[in-house]
């Protein structure tokens, strides 16, 4: 089963439906499986004086959510655009009201963001839909995550996530992929906040079944996530790299199967070669031999076995020896 690659468009549309549709179209062109947005219903989600995240202080949070919100009709248009270009529409819910609106849209799966892991009423409501669930663990202790996983239902994938923007390499927590898999017996993935593709590539090599990466039309766009998100060419490279890693993992190689390397061995390996004229019947000494290309005769690794044998015929200098030349 291939890795689910989620392009996290989030709020990088900045309230423009046109930008949101273009994000979906480009994510599809880049080869992503899903494009994920965020449905913020400020009245049901946050107080008016709730603080903004430290990396985005340009606009009060409530006002930002209000300004960038889509109507149900706009969400429907966006989902239809996703369907049209063949990419799955995914959207994070941040309240029970948001979840109900997403259910009306007919989404195929749900995403529980890191900040909602301790909102167990929302987690239980998501589980009650019976749909696959992605759960980011960026702000959770083990005790908090244990409760959320128990509440989230059977169709759950747990995503390792570090809620630092951007996440430095030493805080990615690749070790936690194996711990999450062992602790919960669920598929695992990475919600990646690093700059660049390396963390995602490493996670796939370590068995991640889902990779989520922030995605933007341009790092210069306004908003909390654009500056650390992948632009289209970077997302395309990420997708290609993950698909190549999948191919590597799915194609075990037998180290003893050298048939496919026969031509390369002939060209690059060495044989036992005469470095002096050896008359017929002469006992062959080490001084008469050397290891030289090509690899078409007695293999160089057997040079010492040839020493002490007799020449069957006259062997001119610079001849590649074969078994027919010695007795």
Image (cartoon, rainbow, N blue to C red):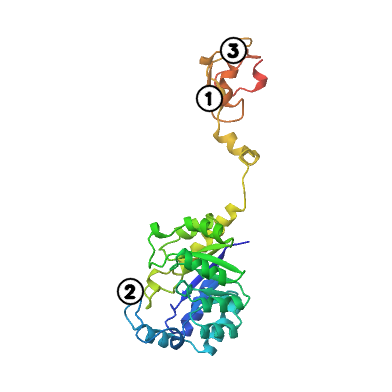
Q: Which residue is mark 3?
A: 308
Q: Is residue 287 above or below residue 79?
A: above
Q: Secondary structure at mark 2?
A: loop
Sequence order check, earlier mark of 1 and 2: 2
Quarter holding the C terminus is top right
Contact between marks 1 and 3 (CB within 8 A): the answer is no
Q: Which of these two is toward me, 127 or 86?
A: 127
Contact between marks 3 and 2 (CB within 8 A): the answer is no
**C-alpha span from label 1 to label 2:** 67 Å
Q: Position of residue 303 (x, y in %)?
A: 56, 21
Q: Position of residue 232 (x, y in %)?
A: 47, 69
- For label 1, count other residues whose C-alpha is less than 10 Å away and answer few (under 14), some (14-19) or many (20+): many
Q: Position of residue 153 (x, y in %)?
A: 60, 71
Q: Secondary structure at mark 3?
A: loop
Sequence order check, earlier mark of 3 and 2: 2
Q: Which residue is mark 2?
A: 54
Sequence order check, earlier mark of 1 and 3: 1
């Amino acid at each position: 089963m291939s890795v689910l690659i989620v392009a996290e468009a989030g709020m990088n549309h900045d309230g423009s439906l046109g930008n949101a549709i273009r994000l979906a179209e480009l994510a599809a062109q880049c080869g992503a499986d899903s494009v994920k947005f965020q449905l913020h219903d400020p009245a049901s989600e946050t107080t008016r004086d709730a603080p903004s995240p430290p990396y985005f202080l340009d606009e009060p949070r409530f006002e930002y959510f209000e300004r960038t919100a889509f109507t149900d009709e706009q969400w429907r248009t966006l989902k239809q655009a996703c369907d049209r270009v063949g990419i799955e529409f995914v959207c994070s819910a941040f309240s029970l009201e948001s979840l109900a609106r997403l259910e009306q849209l007919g989404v195929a799966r749900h995403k529980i963001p890191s900040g909602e892991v301790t909102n167990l009423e929302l987690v239980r409501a998501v589980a009650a839909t019976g749909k696959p669930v992605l759960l980011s663990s960026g702000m959770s202790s083990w005790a908090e995550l244990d409760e959320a996983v128990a509440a989230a239902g059977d169709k759950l994938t747990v995503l390792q996530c570090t809620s630092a923007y951007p996440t430095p390499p030493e805080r990615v927590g690749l070790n936690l992929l194996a711990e999450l898999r062992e602790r919960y017996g669920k598929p695992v993935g990475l919600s990646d906040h690093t700059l660049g593709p390396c963390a995602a590539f490493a996670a796939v090599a370590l068995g991640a079944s889902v990779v989520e990466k922030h995605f933007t039309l341009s790092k210069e766009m306004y908003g909390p996530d654009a500056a650390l998100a992948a632009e289209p060419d970077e997302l395309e490279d990420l997708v290609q790299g993950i698909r190549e890693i999948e191919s590597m993992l799915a194609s075990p190689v037998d180290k003893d199967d050298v048939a496919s390397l026969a031509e390369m061995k002939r060209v690059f390996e060495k044989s036992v070669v005469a470095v002096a004229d050896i008359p017929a019947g002469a006992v062959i000494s080490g001084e008469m031999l050397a290891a030289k290309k090509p690899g078409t005769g007695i293999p160089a690794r057997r040079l010492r076995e040839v020493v002490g044998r007799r020449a069957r015929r006259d062997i001119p200098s610079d001849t590649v020896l074969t078994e027919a030349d010695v007795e």
